[in-house]
Image (cartoon, helix red, strand yellow):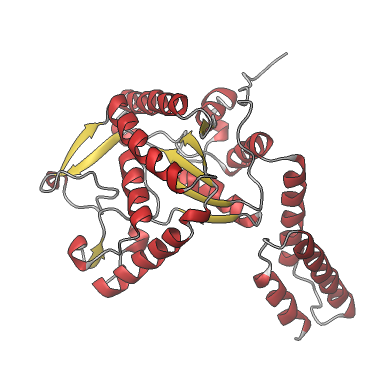
């Protein structure tokens, strides 16, 4: 008896390896996958603007990364004792404008400098509903709890998203000749929009993504995270207590499906090795000064050296420092 409706993973998705330079932008689902990629020692820049939800905010962020133009004080505003950027998550806000700009421009500069080496770009669209600043007419990435009277809320059209991304990707793919783009739609429902309006939003994103993929068939692909959660895992036991976000088990399941579609057998083995090393390092012995534990740390150091020799682009500096610190106690 079949108790699921399995989602067939698309064939021919571009493989992601540890030699790739990755950037992930989008909703908190992008952060979840980006965190797991980082923990597995992939070279990732995850959400350099913080969490963003709608396609136009993502494209605005990407265009700013391309130019690398630093943000200035005139692009920030003060509200509730903090300085905010309308294009950044609240993690970048600060009590004074200098600190906020340092946070924003540090991440922007890093993203800009690594752009030409970028080989994989993962975008996660969360909603097609946008908030426009009434004064400037620009779509904002975050309202920072400003009163609704400052904004105009509307639903993007399919044509609007497609036109924007054709323009964006045409330029970006010319600058980054090795770049492959993978788009996902966040399965997280935006209940504040209402269930019906959320469905209209997701449908808009799905239709726009399909069109964009068809216009760049060799460079842009779609991974069905949305369908995996809504069709393959169609049960509230796969959700967190808020009944909106996926549970930890669900994120792990989607990660496994993502690995199946986007990792080679060698990459999957390397991911497993990196995960085991992380588990070994998290082990807290009863006697950290014992010879047995020091031998255990020595074995970890040996594994790290062997991996670094074979895969010199892996970054194990922090792990080696941790081992040395524990060995010298």
Q: In this view, does 200 lie to the left or right of 285?
A: left
95 or 244: which is nearer to us? 95
Residue 152 in percent (x, y) is at 16, 39
Which residue is found at the position 29% from the left and 53% from the top?
87
Q: Is residue 61 left or right of residue 260?
A: left
112 or 2: which is nearer to us? 112
Q: Quadrant of residue 160?
A: top left
State the residue lying farthest toward the top.
1
State the residue lying farthest toward the bottom.
329
Residue 148 in percent (x, y) is at 16, 45
Q: Is residue 62 left or right of residue 118?
A: left
> On screen, 307 above or below 256?
below
Q: In which quarter of the image is residue 27?
A: top left
Q: Is residue 149 left or right of residue 217?
A: left
Q: Which quadrant, please, contains the N terminus?
A: top right
132 or 68: which is nearer to us? 68
> On screen, 285 above or below 156?
below
Residue 74 in percent (x, y) is at 17, 64
Which residue is found at the position 73% from the left and 56% from the top?
274
Q: Which quadrant, please, contains the C terminus?
A: bottom right
Which residue is found at the position 38% from the left and 43% from the top?
171
Q: How many labels does the image show?
A: 0
Residue 219 in percent (x, y) is at 51, 35
Which residue is found at the position 59% from the left and 24% from the top?
232
188 or 203: which is nearer to us? 203
Q: Is residue 11 visible?
A: yes
Q: Is residue 26 visible?
A: no
């Amino acid at each position: 008896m079949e108790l699921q409706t399995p989602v067939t993973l698309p064939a021919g998705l571009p493989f992601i390896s540890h030699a790739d330079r990755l950037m992930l932008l989008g909703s908190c689902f992008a952060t979840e996958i980006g965190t797991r990629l980082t923990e597995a020692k992939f070279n990732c820049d995850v959400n350099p603007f913080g969490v963003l939800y709608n396609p136009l905010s993502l494209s605005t962020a990407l265009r700013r990364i391309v130019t690398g133009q630093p943000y200035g004080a005139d692009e920030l505003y003060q509200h509730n004792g903090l300085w905010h950027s309308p294009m950044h998550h609240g993690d970048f806000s600060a009590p004074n404008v200098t600190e906020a700009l340092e946070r924003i421009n540090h991440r922007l500069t890093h993203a800009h400098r690594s752009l030409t080496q970028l080989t994989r770009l993962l975008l996660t669209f969360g909603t097609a509903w946008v908030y426009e600043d009434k004064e400037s007419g620009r779509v904002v990435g975050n309202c920072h709890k400003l009163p609704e009277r400052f904004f105009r809320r509307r639903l993007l059209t399919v044509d609007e998203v497609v036109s924007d991304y054709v323009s964006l990707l045409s330029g970006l793919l010319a600058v980054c000749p090795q770049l492959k783009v993978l788009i996902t739609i966040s399965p997280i429902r935006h209940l504040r929009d209402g269930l019906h309006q959320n469905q209209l939003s997701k449908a808009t994103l799905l239709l726009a993504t399909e069109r964009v993929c068809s216009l760049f068939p060799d460079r842009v692909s779609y991974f069905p995270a949305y369908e995996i959660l809504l069709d393959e895992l169609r049960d509230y036991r796969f959700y967190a207590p808020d009944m909106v976000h996926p549970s930890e088990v669900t994120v792990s399941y989607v990660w496994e499906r993502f690995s199946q579609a986007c990792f080679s057998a060698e990459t999957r083995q390397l991911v497993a090795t990196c995960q085991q090393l992380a588990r070994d390092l998290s082990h807290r012995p009863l006697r950290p000064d014992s010879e047995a534990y020091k031998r255990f740390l020595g074995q970890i150091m040996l594994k790290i050296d062997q991996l670094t020799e074979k895969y010199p682009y892996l970054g194990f500096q922090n792990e080696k420092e941790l081992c040395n610190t524990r060995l010298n106690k």
